[in-house]
């Protein structure tokens, strides 16, 4: 919160664009897990949105937005003793601020067109990338109602914990959080777990069998809000 409260007005005053934020990723979904290995950190994702209309006028490039946000984070570091490091150079799809209390905040940067409510991710390589974290979060949120969603979240966390252990030393092959989230959610629906009142162990076994059978037939995992994208 302190980070957001600093960089939003800093960027708006410096560059003149309205700025909004959207908490996203595992923290938003309620599927964050404790770090499994020594030296790992909690991961929090906060999307930062520059707002302007697509009116044909010249606007900042993706690379410019990324430079602006990186400078804002470095400026904040001078005011926040708990901020240990701003990773430089930044990652391809986000900047990262690392804090003393065993967590980091990833800050992906977007252009938001308010009139169409559409978003595009700014990459370090100066390209716009189609990405809408809000849409897939709303898909997940509406997937099942409480209290069933609590078990769904726990099942996602179990599979994420497994992946952290099973793929130790093979991080490039480790399934991403969003892949595991989609696989578990769709297996949860396929197996009707919202209505079966299983305990977590039986629900997990059922989910794993379902995912195993699915991936045996096809390794493709479409993005549920953009089926042309293979997650």
Image (spheres, helix red, strand yellow):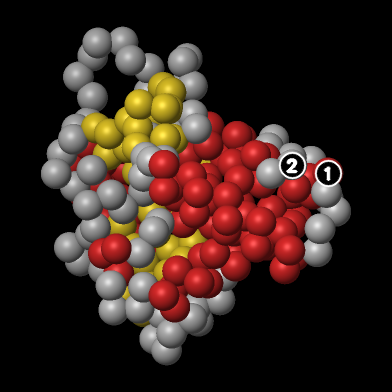
Q: Relative to 213, say whether 230 is above or below.
A: above
Say if 118 sits above or below 167 in the image: above
Percent x, y of residue 224: 50, 32
**Residue at the spot x=74%, y=42% of the render?**
192
| Residue furthest out toward the top | 55
Q: Is residue 103 above or below residue 220?
A: below
> Where's residue 216, x and y in %?
41, 48
Quick check: 135 left or right of 19?
right
Residue drawn at 56 percent across, 76 percent down: 34
Q: Regarding mark 1 in the picture, which secondary structure is present there? A: helix
View extreme (left): residue: 125
Label drawn at residue 192: 2
Q: Are marks 2 and 1 in contact (CB under 8 Å)?
A: yes
Q: Is residue 59 visible?
A: yes
Residue 14: quadrant of the picture: top left
How dense is the environment of label 1, judged by Cα within 10 Å: few (below 14), some, or many (20 and up)? few
Horizontal side of 226 relative to 69 (left or right) equals right
Which is nearer the eye, 185 or 212?
Answer: 212
Report the front residue among 145 and 41. Answer: 145
Distance from disc 2 to disc 1, alpha carbons, whole Å, reads 6 Å
Residue at the image position 56 percent from the left and 70 percent from the top = 33
Between 181 and 187, the residue placed more toward the observer is 187
**Residue at the disc numbered 1:** 195
Q: Which mark is residue 87?
A: none
**Disc 2, SS:** loop
Q: For the N terminus, which image quadrant?
A: bottom right
Q: Residues within 10 Å of mark 2 (few under 14, many from 20)?
A: few
Quadrant, the C terminus: top left
Q: At 42% from the left edge and 35% from the top edge, which residue is drawn?
A: 222
Work out which residue is located at the far bottom of the displayed protein and give it.
38
Percent of width and height locating residue 125: 14, 44
């Amino acid at each position: 919160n302190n980070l957001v409260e600093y960089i939003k007005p800093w960027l708006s005053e410096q560059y003149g664009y309205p700025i909004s934020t959207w908490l996203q990723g595992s923290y938003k979904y309620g599927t964050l897990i404790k770090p499994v290995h020594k030296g790992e950190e909690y991961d929090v994702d906060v999307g930062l949105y520059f707002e302007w209309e697509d009116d044909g006028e010249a606007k900042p490039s993706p690379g410019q937005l990324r430079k602006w946000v990186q400078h804002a984070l470095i400026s904040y570091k001078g005011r926040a003793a708990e901020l240990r490091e701003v990773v430089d150079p930044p990652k391809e799809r986000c900047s990262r601020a690392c804090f003393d209390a065993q967590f980091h905040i990833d800050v992906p940067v977007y252009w938001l067109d308010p009139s169409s409510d559409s978003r595009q991710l700014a990459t370090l390589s100066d390209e716009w990338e189609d990405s809408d974290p809000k849409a897939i979060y709303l898909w997940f949120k509406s997937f099942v109602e409480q209290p069933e969603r609590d078990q769904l979240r726990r099942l996602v966390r179990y599979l994420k914990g497994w992946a952290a252990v099973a793929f130790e030393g093979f991080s490039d092959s480790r399934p991403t959080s969003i892949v595991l989230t989609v696989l578990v959610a769709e297996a949860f629906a396929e197996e009707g777990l919202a209505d079966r009142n299983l305990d977590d162990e039986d629900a997990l076994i059922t989910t794993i069998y379902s995912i195993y059978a699915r991936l045996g037939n096809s390794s493709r995992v479409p993005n549920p809000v953009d089926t042309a994208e293979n997650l």
